[in-house]
Image (cartoon, grey):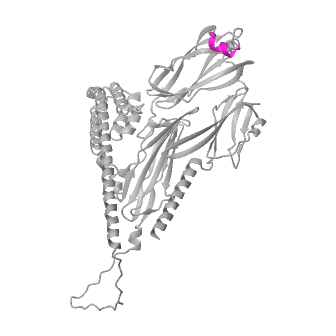
């Protein structure tokens, strides 16, 4: 009977595992995402629409698109990804469309079996006039667009480069984008996109490339011109044979073309910005999630709170820390998870997010208040100060289930002279034991216990070997990393000693590059976010001085003391990391 029950439980667990695997790998469709690769479209220009379906969907019907668009090409692909043993199946359809007329056009809902995509609108403008009368006879030229022309320090500037060609080219090479005057961080936005357009009744193939530029100093930002070198293919001598294209040397004239240089005015941090960390963005949103949802607080039971900050126009390194466990009530034991930054390069700019999770375990019943979370930021669209806020919350913690269902027993005092009353007990017959059963039972118990000890010793030995190997590898890596940090730290110490703010910034970025080799910070603000206080406060002070138009004397001793304190803390954490990892969780 006992064996039958165990088998039933085992098969039930296996069945649930298969169900979970099936839903994670081949789950139902979560929806259809629609993405357009270009935001500004003109007549006689093509653009690309991508439909992405997560899970299983039916075959799409793209016929409704033919009302306002011409389908130039269509491609389909399948992508399966695994993150933390969770499988995600995505079907992707990419369509190249050409609008049939100008105006506000609608990409209608597309049916994918039992689900459908959302409708979206695009604006198709009239054909742009040529910027130069010479473009009528040009077969190859570059065009540059920068938005905005005036920006704040550390805010995002979108630099767009377009290559127009009406002939075939080969062996093309383009110089890198360089900043001639000023200081800026440059990031390329995704892959190049191609389309066709018409200028002055002439058809052009266009290749468009975008960059995100984050100026690090106020003043004038001078962007150097880009140079393209390419070989113009002779249409009369162009080979039509596939084999000739491999074995015949390409002929044509090599030509160099240059784009225009661009100057951008970079403004300092506004005086009316009151936040501790400068955050210039197009949009900034705070979101909250609970597990379980809605949260139910009981003594001894964990509840996970997830805070996500989404930003448009900021890198992930610019986003601040969201939750401070020191501000929580002492009756809530906090176990924060490692923050998860994310960054996407889209055609409209950098989209980033920072997600922080914290498990809270109440130790005492009662009413408690979770403090509000407020993040001031500067809206670059409206040019004003705004605040993203999660209001304070009052939670009620109920007693544990054991405390409510199993109250402490009341012990009655007993007298020494009291004589317990005998309760009549029915006679129980003596059990009959077979003589041969006892030795067999004893043998099975001894063998089972012996093999359990052997298995336990082997597992313990394997675990200790793995622990020693990991510790040895970690120590060797730390020695290499420490040696690489000595020179930048010495330069930082000297810069702080002589109160040289510019050299301190250079040395601090060099040290951070060796300290975080996998993903080095790109700005001082990024370093402050990763190190926390007191370095974050000192970095913000240094940032304000570097980007301010007022001449102020800087004292570097406090920054050097903060860096030393951070290094001491990191050394102490690493020395006890192997013995204290997840120790609080094992106590539960």
Q: Quadrant of residue 362?
A: bottom left
Magenta residues (range): 240-248
Q: Quadrant of residue 37?
A: top right
Q: Position of residue 278 (x, y in %)?
A: 44, 37
Front residue of this view, candidates 70 and 531: 70
Query: In the figure, is residue 483 to the left or right of 8?
Result: left
Task: Work out whether 270 lies above or below 132.
Answer: below
Q: Is residue 470 visible?
A: yes
Q: Is residue 114 magenta?
A: no
Residue at x-position 28% and y-position 45%:
576
Residue at x-position 31% and y-position 31%:
481
Task: Work out whether 364 lies above or below 139.
Answer: below
Q: Quadrant of residue 420?
A: bottom left
Query: In the figure, is residue 333 to the left or right of 292?
Result: left
Q: Which quadrant holds the C terminus?
A: bottom left
Q: Position of residue 340 (x, y in %)?
A: 45, 43
Front residue of this view, candidates 77 and 229: 77
Residue at x-position 36% and y-position 86%:
429
Front residue of this view, candidates 322 and 489: 489
């Amino acid at each position: 009977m006992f064996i039958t029950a165990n088998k039933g439980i085992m098969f039930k667990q296996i069945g649930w595992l298969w169900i979970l695997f099936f839903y994670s790998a081949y789950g139902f469709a979560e929806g259809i995402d629609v993405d357009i690769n270009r935001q500004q479209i003109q007549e006689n220009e093509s653009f690309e629409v991508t439909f992405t379906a997560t899970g299983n969907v039916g075959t799409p019907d793209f016929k409704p698109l033919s009302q306002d668009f011409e389908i130039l090409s269509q491609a389909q692909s399948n992508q399966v990804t695994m993150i933390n043993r969770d499988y995600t199946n995505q079907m992707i359809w990419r369509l190249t469309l050409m609008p049939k007329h100008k105006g506000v056009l609608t990409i209608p809902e597309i049916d994918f079996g039992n689900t459908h995509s959302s409708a979206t609108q695009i604006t198709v403008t009239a054909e742009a006039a040529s910027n130069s009368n010479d473009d009528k006879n040009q077969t190859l030229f570059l065009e540059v667009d920068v938005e905005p022309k005036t920006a704040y320090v550390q805010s995002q500037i979108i630099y767009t480069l377009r290559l127009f060609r009406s002939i075939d080219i080969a062996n093309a090479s383009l110089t890198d984008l360089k900043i001639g005057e000023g200081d800026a961080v440059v990031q390329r936005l995704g892959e190049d996109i191609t389309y066709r357009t018409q200028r002055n009744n002439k058809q052009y193939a266009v290749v468009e490339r975008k960059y995100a530029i984050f100026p690090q100093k106020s003043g004038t930002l001078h962007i150097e011109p880009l140079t393209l070198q390419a070989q113009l293919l002779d249409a009369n001598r162009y080979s039509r044979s596939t084999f000739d294209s491999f074995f015949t040397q390409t002929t044509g004239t090599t030509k160099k073309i240059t784009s225009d240089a661009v100057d951008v005015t970079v403004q300092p941090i506004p005086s009316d910005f009151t936040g501790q960390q400068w955050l210039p963005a197009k949009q900034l949103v705070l979101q909250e999630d609970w597990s379980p949802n809605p949260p139910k607080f009981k003594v001894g039971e964990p509840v996970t709170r997830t805070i996500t900050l989404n930003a448009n126009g900021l890198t992930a390194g610019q986003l601040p820390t969201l939750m401070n466990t020191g501000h929580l009530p002492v009756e809530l034991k906090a176990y924060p998870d490692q923050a998860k930054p994310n960054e996407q390069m889209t055609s409209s700019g950098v989209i980033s997010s920072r997600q922080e999770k914290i498990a809270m375990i109440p130790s005492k019943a009662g009413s408690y208040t979770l403090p509000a979370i407020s993040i001031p930021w500067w809206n670059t669209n409206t040019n004003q100060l705004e605040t993203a806020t999660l209001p304070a919350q009052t939670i009620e913690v109920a007693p544990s289930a054991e405390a409510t269902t199993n109250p402490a027993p009341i012990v009655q005092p007993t007298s020494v002279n009291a004589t317990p009353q005998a309760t009549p007990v029915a006679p129980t017959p003596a059990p009959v034991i077979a003589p041969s059963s006892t030795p067999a039972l004893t043998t099975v118990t001894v063998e089972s216990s012996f093999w359990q000890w052997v298995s336990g010793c082997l597992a313990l030995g394997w675990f200790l070997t793995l622990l020693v190997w990991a510790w040895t590898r970690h120590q060797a890596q730390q020695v290499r990393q420490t040696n690489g940090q000595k020179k930048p730290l010495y330069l930082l110490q000297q810069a702080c000693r002589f109160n040289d703010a510019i050299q301190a910034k250079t040395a601090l970025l060099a040290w951070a590059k060796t300290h975080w080799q996998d993903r080095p910070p790109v700005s001082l603000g990024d370093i402050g976010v990763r190190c926390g206080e007191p370095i974050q406060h000192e970095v913000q002070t240094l940032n304000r001085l570097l980007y301010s138009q007022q001449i102020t004397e800087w004292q570097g001793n406090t920054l050097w003391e903060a860096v030393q304190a951070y290094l001491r803390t990191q050394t102490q954490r690493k020395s006890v990391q192997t013995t204290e990892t997840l120790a609080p969780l094992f106590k539960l």
